[in-house]
Amino acid sequence: MRNTQQIVERKVVVAGQIKKLEAELATAKERETLTVGEDYTIKVGRKSEQAELNTYAEVQATLIAQAEQDGKIIYKFRYGEGFDETTVVGDANRVVWEDGDEKVRSTEVITNRIVKAQDELEALDTEYAEAEARESVAAGDTVSVKLGRGETAREVPAEVLGVHTDATGKKTVAVVAEDAVVLVGIGALVFYNEE
């Protein structure tokens, strides 16, 4: 169970990921504008750990047609010559996008990751509200606090003297534990599920 500070830190990380993914998506959308008649490297076959089942290959193919189907652009590629000529239909995920030596993701993959990150942000908002309610301690409250490390680690009862939240959202709690005033992070307080 994460405390509010851990949740805030995670939200910052996820928001940063979303920002990077949105920039990558803008670049990918520009890149995925395919032109009929142009040659592209595409993926054909299937990857498999077993050599006899592995038919995956990357081949040079010419884009011969494109159409919109169910709100998605579908492409028709042709590769090979003569009797070995093959036609393949697929979306932009079939194209091998390379940026230097690094392979890059398609708009569909990036969009899915953005949606997943946004869902995580929403879940973190809910988790934050629950953690904040759980952590709402005030002067005079009796709590359990974790003190010490390693062999001296222990959980002891304590009385809250006060709570301070800094500009970053980090909470520090002043408690009286074992006849001493101790400053601890909110993570040192022990909260039990009331389920």
Image: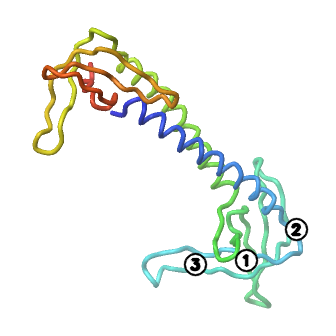
Which residue is pictured at 23% across the width and 22% down the height? 181
* Residue position for label 2: 35
2 or 3: tag closer to the N-terminus: 2
Q: Which amino acid does label 3 sit on?
A: Tyr
Which residue is pictured at 31% across the width and 10% down the height? 139
* Residue position for label 1: 41
Closer to us: 58 or 103:
103
**Of helix, strand and loop, which one carries label 3?**
loop
Image: 47 above or below 17? below
**On the image, which quarter does residue 151 sit in?**
top left
* Residue furthest left in the image: 151
- State the CA–CA distance, disc 1 to disc 3: 13 Å
- State the CA–CA distance, disc 1 to disc 2: 13 Å
Q: Are marks 1 and 3 in contact (CB under 8 Å)?
A: no
Which residue is pictured at 48% across the width and 28% down the height? 169
Locate residue 81, reporting x and y percent.
79, 89
Image: 62 above or below 178? below
Q: Do the residues labelled 2 and 3 touch (CB within 8 Å)?
A: no
* Residue position for label 3: 56
1 or 3: tag closer to the N-terminus: 1
Q: What residue type is labelled 2?
A: Thr
1 or 2: tag closer to the N-terminus: 2
